[in-house]
Amino acid sequence: MATSYLPGADMERFLTDAMKFVGFGDDDVAVIRRTGHLVLAKEQALTGALYDHFLSMPDSARFFLAADGTPDRTRLERRKHSLGKWLRQTAEAAITPDFSYYVLMIGLSHSHRAQGPDRPGGTVPARMMVGAMSLTQSALAGIFAAELPPAEAMAASISWNKLLLVQLNALLLGYVPVGESGSSSSAAPTSKGASMSDPKRLSMPVGEAMFTQRSIRKFKPDPIAMDDLNLIIDAAVKAPNGGNRQVGRFLLLTDRKKIHDEFGPLYYEAWWAKRRDEGHAWKTLDEIPAADKNHRAAAQLANEIKDAPAVVFALAINNGPANSVIPACQNLMLAARTLGIGSLPTTLHPTVMDRFRAMFKIPADVAFHFCIPLGYPRGTFGPNVRKPTSETTFLGEWGKPVPWK
Ligand code: HEM
Ligand SMILES: Cc1cc2nc3c(=O)[nH]c(=O)nc-3n(C[C@H](O)[C@H](O)[C@H](O)COP(=O)(O)O)c2cc1C
C-alpha cells in the first residue's frame, strides 16, 4: 500500500486505503450493521473470555497485575469496559474521521504505554495486538456459526474479518515507522533479527544515567517487562570485551518463587559468610552499628533480595576473565537506570558456589562474576557520591596533580 502522506495526519484516508486494499465495500458495511446486535448481545462474554485468555499466560497477564502480583480487578473491569466500547463502535462500521482517530488513539495507548508502577508491563508488544485481533475474529466466527444460517454466518465472518484487519493496520501504526513509501523504514536491525529491543528507548542523556546510577537495594514488587530485560541485555553485550571473543554469558532469573524460596536464602547465607571472613561477629542487621551505613545497606539487601523481581548472573564460558564481563555489567546497569530500573553489582561466597551451580545447572567451566538484582526502586536514584577526581587522578606521572579541583 503506497502512501504519499503521513497516516497519522490523515487517518481517514489511511483507513479508506486499507479498506480498498482488502475489498471492504458497502456490502460489508451492510452485513456488519445487520449482525452487530449478535456481537453486542455477547459483549460481556467476549470481553471476559479475551481477558481470561490474557491472564492465562504470564507474558500477557503482566499488564494487569497489581503490586502484589495478583490480577488487578478494578483495572480489568475498566479494560473490559473500554474493549466493549470498541466493539460497539466497530459494530456501527462508520469509518468517520472521529472513528479513525479513535482507533489510532487505541493503538498509541498500547504501543507507547510507558512502564511505571501504575502501568504494569509497559508497552504491549505488537504480536499481542495481532493475537488479540485473531482471538476476536475466532470468537466472532463462533458466534455467527451458532446464530446464523451457514451462508450468512460465512458472510458475517468475512466482513467482520476485513474490518478488524483494517483496524489492525491502524492499531499497529505506533509500532512500525511508516515512511513515505508506506514501508517500514527504520526498525532497528539486530544480530538475530528477532529481538524486540529498540535502542531509541534508552534516550536519557548518558551523563544523567552515569551520575545517578547508584546502587539500588530496595525494590518494589512490580515485575519487569521481558521486552525491557531484552533491551537491557542487548545493551549489555555491546560493551567492550577481550579480543571480541564474547565469553560473557547472562543467566536471567525471573521466576519469583525460585528467587524467593531458593536463591534469596542462598544469597543471604553468602553475604553473612563474607562478614564472618571479614572478622565481624554480627549475626543480624540490627547488630551492625548505625554508623556503618555500607554494611547496613548491604545487609538490608541480603534480607530483601528474595523479593527482587529479577536477578541477572554475569558469567563467562571457558572460565573467562571478569574483565571481559564487567564492562557489560556496567552497560546493563546503565541501561536499566535509563528505564527507571534499579540494580547493583553483588558477589557470592565460596561456601554457596556448589549449591549455586547446582541450582541453575551452571557447568564447572563457566565462571561466575556478578549477581545483579533488578527492580523498580523503593526510593530514588542518585546522585552517587565519590571522592573528588582531583584526589584519585594524576597527570603524566604518578602523584602529579590534575589541573582541576
Ligand atoms: C484487538 C486488540 C485490542 C484492542 C482493540 C484494545 C482496546 C483497548 C482500549 C479501547 C483501551 C483503552 C484505551 C484508552 O482509554 O487509552 C485499552 C487499554 C489497554 N489495553 Fe488494550 N486492546 C487490545 C489489545 C490489548 C492487548 C493484547 C493487551 C495486553 C495483553 C492490552 C492491554 C491493555 C492495557 C494494559 C490497557 C491500559 C489499561 C490500564 O492500564 O488501565 N490490550 N485497550
Ligand atoms: C565488586 C563489587 C562488589 C559489590 N558487592 C556488593 C554486595 O555484595 N552487596 C552490596 O550491597 N553492594 C555491593 N556492591 C555495591 C557497592 O557497595 C556500591 O557500588 C558502593 O558502595 C558505592 O555506592 P553507590 O553504587 O550507591 O554509589 C559491590 C560493588 C562492586 C563493584
Image (spheres, grey):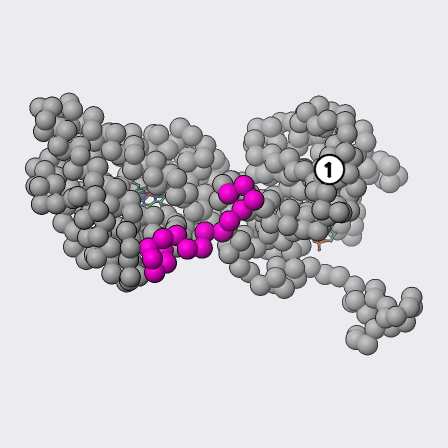
Q: Is residue 181 magenta?
A: yes
Q: Secondary structure at mark 1?
A: strand
User: Which range of residues does the magenta coloring cover?
Assistant: 178-193
Where residue 131 appears, x then y in whole percent?
34, 36
- Residue found 63% across the figure and 47% down from its top: 236
- Residue found 45% across the figure and 46% down from its top: 122
Q: Is residue 126 above or below residue 355?
A: below
- Residue found 39% across the figure and 55% down from its top: 177
Q: Main secondary structure of the magenta part?
A: loop
| Quadrant of the image occupied by residue 386 | bottom right
Q: Horizontal placement of 220 versus 281: left or right?
A: left
Q: The disc labelled 1 sits on which kind of residue?
A: Ala
Q: Considering depth in this image, is 21 or 8 the residue closer to the camera?
A: 21
Where residue 48 appears, x then y in whole percent?
28, 32
Q: Is residue 326 visible in the rendered structure shown here?
A: no
Identify the residue under disc 1. Answer: 316
| Quadrant of the image occupied by residue 168 | top left
Where residue 311 appears, x then y in whole percent?
62, 38
Q: Quadrant of ligand 1?
A: top left
Kindly tell me whether mark 1's CB lies below 8 Å from ligand 2. Answer: no
Q: Horizontal placement of 373 versus 149: left or right?
A: right
Q: Considering depth in this image, is 152 or 351 the residue closer to the camera?
A: 152
Q: Residues within 10 Å of mark 1 (few under 14, many from 20)?
A: many
Q: Is residue 78 magenta?
A: no
- Residue found 8% across the figure and 24% down from its top: 149
Q: Horizontal placement of 201 versus 362: left or right?
A: left
Q: Is residue 104 above or below residue 386?
A: above
Q: Is residue 317 visible in the rendered structure shown here?
A: yes
Quadrant of the rendering where the C terminus is positioned: bottom right
Where residue 107 appears, x then y in whole percent?
32, 49
Q: Residue furthest bottom?
A: 403
**Number of numbered discs overlaid on the protein picture:** 1
